[in-house]
Amino acid sequence: MWGRRRRGPAIQIKTAEQIELMRAAGLLVGRTLQVLREAVKPGITTADLDAIAEDHIRSNGGVPSFKGYHGFPATICTSVNEEIVHGIPSPRKVLREGDVISIDCGAIVAGWHGDSAITVPVGEITAEQRRLLEVTETALWHGLAAGVAGARLTDMSHAIESYIRSQGPYGIVEGYGGHGIGTQMHMDPLIPNHGRPGHGPVLEPGMCFAVEPMVNLGTKATRELEDGWTVVTVDGRHSAHFEHTFAVTEDGPRVLTALDEGREWFARLGSSR
């Protein structure tokens, strides 16, 4: 989940012990998303998924980050097809074969936050949809791989954009992006999913960020619905969204919401992690 740009304190530096607490929150989020991925099927409602998420988070010692956040009414964001982010779960929103659904989830453990999102096919989807999901998820991991100590903030932005541009004429959503995270879900700085490298703060061990590309099959143009939350594509074409929370460490990025901390993906990309 993304918070709009605001001014705030300098980037929070976490101790090793605090990062372990964030790992606990991240694991809870990752496992909740795993449960939700398995629950997605034709006929289930987005409200059903929300109930599953809240029960799993609370029964495992966490608190949903999103519920009540600036008035958001649910535990997860469920954004279907042309909905990009911040979709509100509803008992009237029934998933159908061929849909894609972005599920964004956050949890608090011992005062520390984890935040992650996946986009999941509902039954069989088209090759075009499947490729959209693949490109968006891979772009996320290129951004995470660039999150090394000594790099600049926009090196992550540039890595995301460069990969997406290399894959086809996709729309890269602007105005929404990643963020700092720690004792609050949304902290400075904003991390765009596009831009030139070499700008912004230097990354230091102990910094934690949520990185989250949002990619459209059509143009980058978006609009917000009257509910004040749901962001959709203007052209009605489908969108995908993936997100992970990670910590900058001396040994490379540690992905706190990935069950294996990102080892499989970094090996795939040839990263040292």
Image (cartoon, helix red, strand yellow):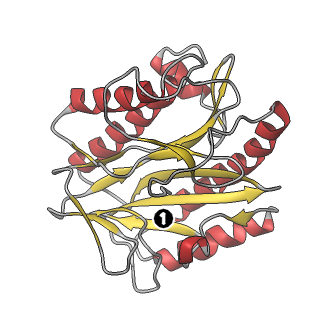
Q: Residue at x 40, y 86 (%)?
A: 92
**Residue 17 shown left or right of residue 14 in the figure:** right
Residue position marked by numbered label 1 in the rendering:
40
Name the kind of residue labelled 1 in the image. Val
Q: Residue at x 68, y 39 (%)?
A: 12
Local packing at callout 1 (Cα closer than 10 Å; few below 14, some 14-19, many 20+) is many
The one of 162 and 188 positioned closer to us in this rendering: 188
x then y, percent, for residue 258: 62, 40
x then y, percent, for residue 164: 28, 33
Is residue 220 placed above or below 17 in the rendered structure? below
**Residue 33 shown left or right of residue 119 in the figure:** right
Q: Residue at x 66, y 55 (%)?
A: 184
The one of 45 and 189 positioned closer to us in this rendering: 189
**Residue 192 shown left or right of residue 37 in the figure:** left
The one of 185 and 241 positioned closer to us in this rendering: 185
Is residue 24 placed above or below 50 in the rendered structure? above
x then y, percent, for residue 269: 46, 20
Residue 12 in view of the camera? yes
Residue farthest bottom in this picture = 92
